[in-house]
Amino acid sequence: MNQKKISNNFSSHMNMNFLPQPFKIINGRLFCESVEINRLASKFGTPIFIYSERAICEAYLKIKNAVAKWPVEICYAVKANPTLGILELLGKLDSGFDVVSGGELSRVLKAVKNPNKIVFSGVGKSEKELELAIKSNVFCINVESISELHTLNKISIKNNVCTPISIRINPDIDPKTHPYISTGLKENKFGLSLDKAKEAYKIASKLTHLHIIGVDCHIGSQIIDKEPYIESTIKLLDFVDSINEIDKTNFHIDLGGGIGICYKDESLPVLDDLFSSILRPIEKWSKKKSLEFPKIIFELGRSIVGPAGLIICEVLALKNGNDENDKNFIIVDAAMNDLMRPALYDAYHEIFPIINFQNSKSKMSWDVVGPICETGDWLGKDRYIHTKQGERLAIASAGAYGSSMASNYNSRSKPAEILIEESGSVKVLKRRETFDDLIRNEI
């Protein structure tokens, strides 16, 4: 059967939008570039994370091209995937970085030569983390409370520096996403209400070692509707109008991130239209005020690395129910400790066989589950997958919030992480953990 026919069969029962171009089905087998994934899994074992270098680069550059006519900086959200090799790759593309901990900041400093475009976000920064940020000369610290202002000023005095800051606004906007990844509603822990933020800017303007350079907002993650972005942008502009503490001739607006990806059949906004819809109100505002267009920052992670990653796992067993109303289970060697999103968010990831793909559709419904001793250890529910013991499955759209949220629950070692380069070369980003790795710090 030729490649075109296989690809058509693939499209007929599964939406291809979740797989970026470097991944393809050839004669029923999954490839990335020229590399057959099943052979790669045989070499490195399962479960395993596999990333496409080209998919990451193309996703980042597509965003950069969509905002090219505006003064926009893209800061990769390190929390999406902090693997050093991925940070290094994005650093070579001249990406900025959004970090939310001292550990993430240290990773960027280790992976990227001369990083000078780092914003430090996060609702609870320790004094040690703030001091590291100051000494690392980050571009901006996004402050999230009045008490943090005072703490940061104290540390800045100690280090004899004037620290650049913005203050995070909570605009009370519903991003229409999962409540666990909504961050811009008043019941969320992030940022300050508009009234509190006004107070915070007044206080910050009087603190001797803080320098106000911008305003910050982030409303949530996996957002596929442009309207919440437009609403939050307009609210931010109204807020900037309402205060005098920001120098409107020289400041930035950090609009956060959260652009969604296709996990199943989501209808995503066209990037050019999305960014134009967000940035046009700022352009109009600037012209009305006779001001230069301010620097804009977007903190994007999932939309850059999410589609570029797969988890490959092996089928350990199939367990049928007693009758047609019972659950049937495909038990695989990946688990909730490798991919937390389904258990945590009830999230959907496409799951499909990586060989014999033309016969991958089953008439029987299965739940795909892992070996962990928790009922919540599932990766997919009610999937019509035809497979058998010993075959391997791919879990798609796992490049973001897969390895970054992984744990060692049940004393399970974390998987290896592999990057497939555009040339077809295979690069190990992270070796598989061993038992000795698991107990290394125990005494």
Image (spheres, grey):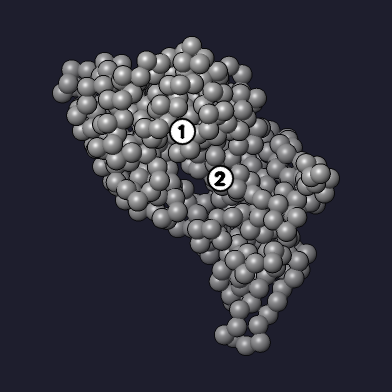
Residue at 56% over, 50% down: 397
Q: Residues within 10 Å of mark 1 (few under 14, many from 20)?
A: many
SS for dot 1: loop
Outermost residue on the left side: it is 288
Q: Closer to the N terminus: mark 2 or mark 1?
A: 1
**Is residue 177 left or right of 358 when viewed as pictured?**
left
Q: Which mark is residue 69?
A: none
**Is residue 371 left or right of 113 when viewed as pictured?**
right
Q: Amino acid at mark 1?
A: Ser
Q: Residues within 10 Å of mark 2 (few under 14, many from 20)?
A: many
Q: Quadrant of residue 343?
A: bottom right
Residue bearing mark 1: 121
Q: Amino acid at mark 2?
A: Ala
Q: Quadrant of residue 321?
A: bottom right
| Comparing labels 2 and 1, the label whose residue is closer to the camera | 1
Q: Is residue 271 above or below residue 286?
A: below
Q: Is residue 190 visible?
A: yes
Number of numbered tags placed on the structure image: 2
In the image, residue 409 lies at what x, y percent? 69, 56
Residue at 32% over, 48% down: 186
Outermost residue on the bottom side: it is 323
In the image, residue 348 lies at what x, y percent? 52, 59
**Quarter of the image with the N terminus in it:** bottom right
Residue bearing mark 2: 400
SS for dot 2: loop
Residue at 44% over, 18% down: 163
**Quarter of the image with the C terminus in it:** top right
Q: Is residue 259 visible?
A: no
CA gap, disc 2 and disc 1: 18 Å
